[in-house]
Image: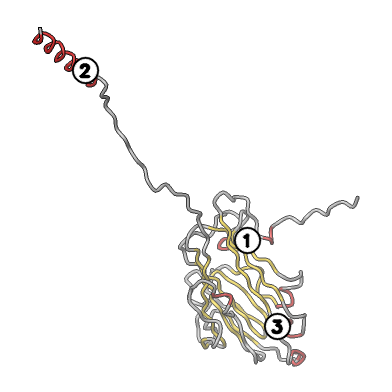
Amino acid sequence: MKKILLSILTIAVVSAVGVAATRAFFSDTETSSGNTFTAGSIDLQIASQCTYNGVACTPDGNWAYGNGKLTSEKFFNFTDIKPGDWGENTVSFKILTNPAWMCASIARTTTANELSNFVNVFWWVDTNGNNIYETGEKVLFGGPLTLQTLWSGGSPLPLTFADSTRNWKYWPEASTIEPIPALTEQHLGIGWCFGTIGLTGSSSTEAPNGFTCTAGVSGAENAAQGDQIVATLAFTAEQSKNNAAFLCPENRPAATPTPTP
C-alpha cells in the first residue's frame, strides 16, 4: 500500500513540472539610449584686413576670426586724414554652424559736418578676398557715394546681405535667393577716399587696390578741418531654416500707423 501511494506522488510531481514548462515564451528586447534634443546655434564670425594709403593699418583694422571681436575692434580709426588719403578694408565673414540670413547697419553717432561731404566710399563683392577691386566684381549699395549721401535717408542705414528677397552676391538681381551658407568664407571690400574715387578695376601701380583717389583742387576741403565722423557698424545673422520669409530691416514694409480712436 505504501509503494502505491509513493508512485502516485511521483507522478503528481512530474505533472507539476510539465505544467510549468508550457508557460515559457520567446521574447526579445531592443534598447535605444541617449535620445537627445539639442538646440542649434548661429555663430557669425568676422575678420578684417585694412590698409591706409597702401600700408597695413595700425593699431586698428586688422584682426583674425574670433568670438566677440567686434566689441573690441574697429574697422576704421584714423585721426589725421588729409585730402587725397585713401584706404581699403576687406571684411571677411563666415557662419560656423548653420546657414543664416544676414543683415547689417551703419549708424552715425556724430552730427553732420563738412567732412562727410568729402569722404567717398564704395563696397564690392571681393570674390577672392585679395583686397583689390577687380573688373567684373559687383559694386554694392550704389557706391561710390559721399558719407553725407550715405546717411541722407537717416541713420542707421540698413543693408541686406541675404534675406528672402535678395542675396548680396547677386545684388541687385533677385534671381538667386539663398542664405549665407555655413562654413563658407565670403568677403566684402570697402574702399574710401578723402576726395573723388575712380574705379579702375586694375592692380597697377597707379591703382594698387583697383581704384584711384583724387583730392579736390578748389580748397573747399578746408572747411572740413577738425571735423570728425564716428559710426557704428553692426552685423546680424538669423537662422534661415523654417524662416523662409525673413526680411532684413531694409526690406520690411513700413509699419501701418495705429488709427487714433
Residue type marked 2:
Ala
Question: Taking 95 as reference, is 253 above or below it?
Answer: above
Q: Residue at x 55, y 63 (%)?
A: 169
The quarter in which the N terminus is drawn is top left
Question: Taking 250 as reference, is 50 above or below it?
Answer: below
Whole-angstrom CA distance, mark 3 to mark 2, is 100 Å
Front label number (3 vs 2): 2
Whole-angstrom CA distance, mark 2 to mark 1, is 88 Å
Q: Which residue is mark 3?
A: 229
Residue type marked 3:
Ile
Residue 236 image position (x, y, % from top left)? 60, 65
**Earlier-in-chain disc, 3 versus 1:** 1
Q: Callout 1: 10 Å neighbours few (<14), some, many (20+)?
A: some
Name which quarter of the figure residue 89 lies in: bottom right
Residue 130 image position (x, y, % from top left)? 48, 76
Whole-angstrom CA distance, mark 3 to mark 1, is 29 Å
Determine the residue located farthest toward the front in the rendered image.
1
Front label number (3 vs 1): 3
Q: Are marks 3 and 1 in contact (CB under 8 Å)?
A: no
Judge from the rendering whether residue 199 lies leftward or rightward of residue 203; answer left or right.
right
Q: Residue at x 39, y 48 (%)?
A: 34
Residue type marked 1:
Pro
Q: Which residue is mark 2?
A: 16
Q: Which residue is mark 1?
A: 172
**Earlier-in-chain disc, 2 versus 1:** 2
Q: Which mark, by number, is residue 210?
A: none
